[in-house]
Image (cartoon, rainbow, N blue to C red):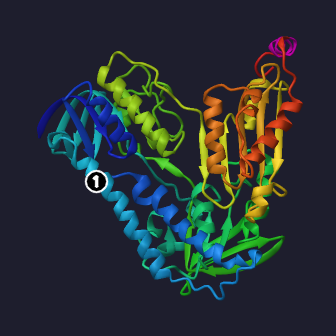
């Protein structure tokens, strides 16, 4: 077996791994970038970009179907499933190509192909052909779909989001399990493209929405397009000659329905179980994931760093990029470990209407402030620009701290949420007060005027001044 010594070994070449490589390269040229599956990112290959291509086609179809609202009659809309999926595949491959070009630009002698496994705290074995002794190691192995045992009854008709983007044509029907980000985005897109869709959840949650009123608003809107059982009661799933048979309860009535495919959108699990972490001496949590510092990505006081979806905390591309950079920097200059910039939390679900969350969630606000906060809100039902465009569905809530008037966070289901969320994230990261935000310009007529309405409502409910600050300090955080 060959042996190689490096300063930094990085396992995985997704968003986090590539970021770690670039950052570590600024500190040392003795690097091993290890990949055992395929080069490229989840985002480009099976995530963000191909799903948005499918959503774009769905939005075009939806706009044509609902032109009657504006007196525009397009006649019968015909959806060419083969053409839809051809564009999805071609544009997906184009995005993947850009990522592969980046990897091709990395130093050839840095790249190592094969599956890595720890044999000691600083030693990796690659496919039993190479041993790498590394001063520091970055784990950036990503994640994979998690499939509950019940769903395996679908057998060969069980699919995950990865499979959809290789379809040659659209199916007639799909049953979706998991109304999270992936399930909602793909389920709604397929429904708008003429696929019969039914969706099941178990816990009642919907796209990570924390506020009950916003959740109910979103659930009602989605059910106008396809049946969504947020607290589904499914008794059996089995493969039949016709497809996938699902037996469930609908308002207390037993139902049986057959679908072409079952899409499992039931979460993801970190790819750390085959790494031989038992040989590292690292403290592991109940999922078998190393415990780590969120700001440095360091695992305990070891020279091991954990970045991206592999740590299973915030599975978003921009977070993975930040974590890769932080982990790579710290691995490169170890033992000089420094806290990196962690940006204001920002999450967006590209449904229609969209779902967004910014800053602290309502649960976190309550834990931090208890009674010393206020909530402002606006319904988009009567909001001017939203109504003009026929997109007047949704609810926005914004949170502020009593005494200081500091903006804390927001949650939203509504039009243009991806843009409003960015404005709010910038405001939160700059630690702006609600008054500061109301002093900003708002054009007319724009959807952002709805945000101003919510902020005005919040401002009216806030009591600003040193007396209120002192009163809230007496309460103490979470008191």
Crowding around mark 1 (Cα neighbors within 10 Å: few <14, some 14 to 19, many 20+) is some
Q: Is residue 286 magenta?
A: no
Q: Position of residue 446 (x, y in %)?
A: 72, 51
Q: Nearer the viewer, residue 212 or 85?
A: 85
Indicate the quadrant containing the N terminus: top left, top right, bottom left or bottom right. top left
Give the residue displayed 53% in from the left and 80% down from the top.
171
The image quadrant of residue 75 is bottom right
Q: Is residue 225 visible?
A: yes
Q: Nearer the viewer, residue 242 or 53?
A: 53
**Span highlighted in magenta in the image:** 467-474
Q: Position of 29 compared to 262: left or right?
A: left
User: How many dots with numbers?
Assistant: 1
The image quadrant of residue 87 is bottom left
Magenta: main secondary structure: helix
Q: Nearer the viewer, residue 279 or 163?
A: 163
Indicate the quadrant containing the C terminus: top left, top right, bottom left or bottom right. top right
Q: Secondary structure under badge 1?
A: helix
Give the residue displayed 31% in from the left and 27% down from the top.
121
Q: Is residue 93 above or below residue 272?
A: below
Q: Is residue 460 above or below residue 253?
A: above
Give the residue displayed 64% in from the left and 40% down from the top.
423
Q: Position of residue 400 (x, y in %)?
A: 78, 30
Q: Position of 472 compared to 8: left or right?
A: right
The image quadrant of residue 279 is top left
- According to the picture, the residue beneath numbered tag 1 turns out to be 100
Residue reaching furthest to the front: 444
Residue reaching furthest to the left: 2
Q: Position of 205 compared to 158: left or right?
A: right
Q: Is residue 236 above or below residue 37?
A: below
Q: Position of residue 454 (x, y in %)?
A: 80, 41
């Amino acid at each position: 077996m060959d042996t190689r010594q490096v300063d930094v070994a990085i396992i995985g070449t997704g968003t986090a791994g590539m970021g770690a490589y670039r950052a570590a390269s600024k500190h040392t040229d003795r690097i091993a970038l290890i990949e055992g599956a395929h080069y490229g990112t989840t985002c480009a290959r099976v995530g963000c970009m191909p799903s948005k291509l499918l959503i774009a086609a769905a939005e075009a179809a939806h706009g044509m179907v609902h032109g009657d609202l504006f007196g525009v009659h397009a006649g019968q809309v015909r959806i060419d499933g083969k053409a839809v999926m051809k564009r999805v595949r071609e544009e997906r491959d184009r995005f993947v190509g850009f990522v592969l070009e980046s990897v091709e630009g990395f130093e050839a002698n840095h790249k190592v192909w094969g599956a890595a496994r720890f044999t000691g705290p600083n030693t990796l074995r690659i496919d039993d052909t190479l041993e790498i002794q590394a001063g520091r190691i970055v784990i950036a192995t990503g994640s994979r779909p998690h499939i509950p045992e019940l769903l395996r009854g679908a057998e060969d008709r069980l699919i995950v989001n990865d499979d959809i983007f290789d379809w040659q044509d659209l199916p007639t029907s799909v049953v979706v399990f998991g109304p999270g980000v992936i399930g909602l985005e793909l389920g709604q897109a397929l429904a708008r493209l003429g696929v019969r869709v039914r969706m099941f959840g178990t816990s009642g949650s919907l796209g990570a929405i924390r506020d009950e009123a916003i959740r109910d608003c979103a659930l009602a809107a989605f059910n106008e397009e396809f049946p969504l059982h947020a607290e589904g009661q499914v008794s059996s799933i089995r493969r039949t000659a016709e497809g996938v048979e699902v037996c469930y309860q609908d308002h207390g009535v037993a139902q049986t329905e057959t679908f072409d495919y079952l899409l499992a959108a039931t979460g993801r699990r970190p790819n750390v179980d085959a790494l031989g972490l038992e040989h590292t001496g690292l403290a592991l949590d109940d999922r078998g994931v190393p415990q780590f510092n969120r700001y440095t990505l360091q695992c305990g006081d070891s020279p091991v760093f954990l970045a991206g979806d592999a740590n299973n905390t915030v599975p978003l591309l921009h977070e993975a990029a930040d974590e890769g950079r932080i982990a790579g920097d710290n691995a490169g200059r170890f033992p000089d470990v420094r806290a990196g910039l962690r940006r204001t939390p920002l999450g967006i679900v590209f449904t229609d209407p969209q779902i967004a969350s910014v800053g602290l969630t309502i649960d976190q606000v309550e834990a931090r402030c208890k009674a010393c906060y206020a909530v402002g809100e606006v319904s988009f039902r009567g909001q001017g620009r939203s109504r003009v465009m026929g997109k007047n569905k949704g609810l926005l809530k914004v949170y502020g701290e009593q005494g200081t008037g500091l903006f804390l966070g927001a949650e939203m289901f509504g039009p243009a949420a991806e843009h409003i969320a960015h404005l709010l994230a910038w405001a939160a990261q700059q630690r702006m007060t609600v008054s500061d935000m109301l002093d900003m310009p708002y054009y007319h007529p724009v959807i952002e005027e709805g945000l101003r309405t919510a902020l005005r409502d919040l401002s009216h409910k806030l009591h600003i001044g040193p007396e209120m600050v002192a009163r809230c300090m007496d309460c103490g955080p979470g008191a």
